[in-house]
Amino acid sequence: MANQNENKIMAEKICFSYPDAEKQALTDVSMRVKRGEFLAILGHNGSGKSTLAKLFNALYVPSSGTIVVCGMDTREDEFVFEIRQHAGMVFQNPDNQIVATVVEEDVAFGLENNGVAPGEMRVRIDEALAAVKMTDFAKSAPHMLSGGQKQRVAIAGVLAMKPDVIILDESTAMLDPSGRAEVMKTVHRLNEREGISVIIITHYMSEAATADYVILMDDGKIAATGKPKEIFSQVQYMRNLGLDVPPMTDLAYQLRKGGVQVPADILTVDEMVEELCRLL
């Protein structure tokens, strides 16, 4: 446990099989999530990334290997409740996570279950809603909110529990571009200001491009790891795995094929503009 403060999640040689499945969903996966890290996990459908997320939250237990979350082994039943407080999960559909008819009551739900004192609860609710910029909607009915706003309420509910890690499992998949931008802005702010470790599992390469570190999953195994620039500059390799790259990385790839000398690891519009201006 010496690395508990530095590593919020440690996975060692994880294997996992679903009942009656012909092959393992995860095979020999080892990784760690550091304190304050923003990590993206990518892979095509069936690659094992969502299974991994559920193992981090102790919704599943590994068939073999160990996962330690904030110093607690997920296989120990006595820790499960506490693990879920330390590693909060935000799912794809916020409607499945919102349980109350008033926003602030929904944020209070987990706190009430934990027996948090009313005075402390009020402080935590207000802080969580402020952190996701939803204070003005505290008395609103969740069903009247947009998708992006609902997802921010779901994040506030997790945040009120004061987690060390927030896991977003395809949490922007059902949102429009502005809703996705809202949620990503929120989690980046929480990561930078609160030092909360963030794991995003996403199909959107532009979201993954903003992470500190990327893990690529393929067929239940880790296929590659690295910083976004290292991962996405391997355009053909990504395509072979059935994955895309950010639009500007693809443009750089096409320009390079056409003989224009731009770096292969461009991720953003600003970087591309800078390079093209330099060439001109």
Image (tube, rainbow, N blue to C red):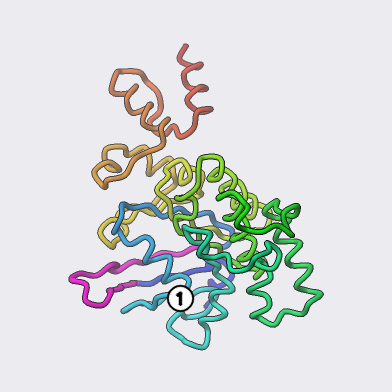
Residue 204 higher or lower than 251, as above or below: below
Name the side, left or right, on which 262 lies relative to 161: left
Q: Residue 252: horizontal and vertical position, in percent?
A: 38, 27
Task: Name the outermost residue toward the left.
Answer: 22
> For this rendering, which residue is in front, 147 or 201?
147
The vertical placement of 149 against 103, above or below, is: above
Label 1, on which residue? 58
The residue positioned 32% from the left and 59% from the top of the image is 222
Side (left or right) of 228 relative to 235: right
Q: Residue 7's x, y, as percent?
A: 52, 67
| Amino acid marked by disc 1 | Ala
Q: Residue at x 45, y 70 (%)?
A: 56
Which residue does the image show at 42% across and 43% down from the upper left? Answer: 205
Placement of 49 over or under 248, stated as above or below: below
The secondary element bearing badge 1 is classed as: loop
Asked if residue 214 lies in the magenta stretch, the reply is no
Number of numbered discs visible in the structure rendering: 1
Asked where in the image residue 88 lies, by quadrant, the reply is bottom right
The stretch in magenta equals 13-34
Q: Which quadrant of the view contains residue 99?
A: bottom right
- x, y percent for residue 181: 56, 43
Q: Quadrant of residue 119?
A: bottom right
Residue at (69, 82) in percent of width and height: 115
Residue 14 in magenta?
Answer: yes
How far across and down, in percent of the image, does residue 174 sit?
46, 50
Residue, far right: 119
Dot 1: within a 10 Å radius of its alpha carbon, few (fewer than 14), some, or many (20 or more) residues?
many
- The vertical placement of 216 against 243, above or below, is below
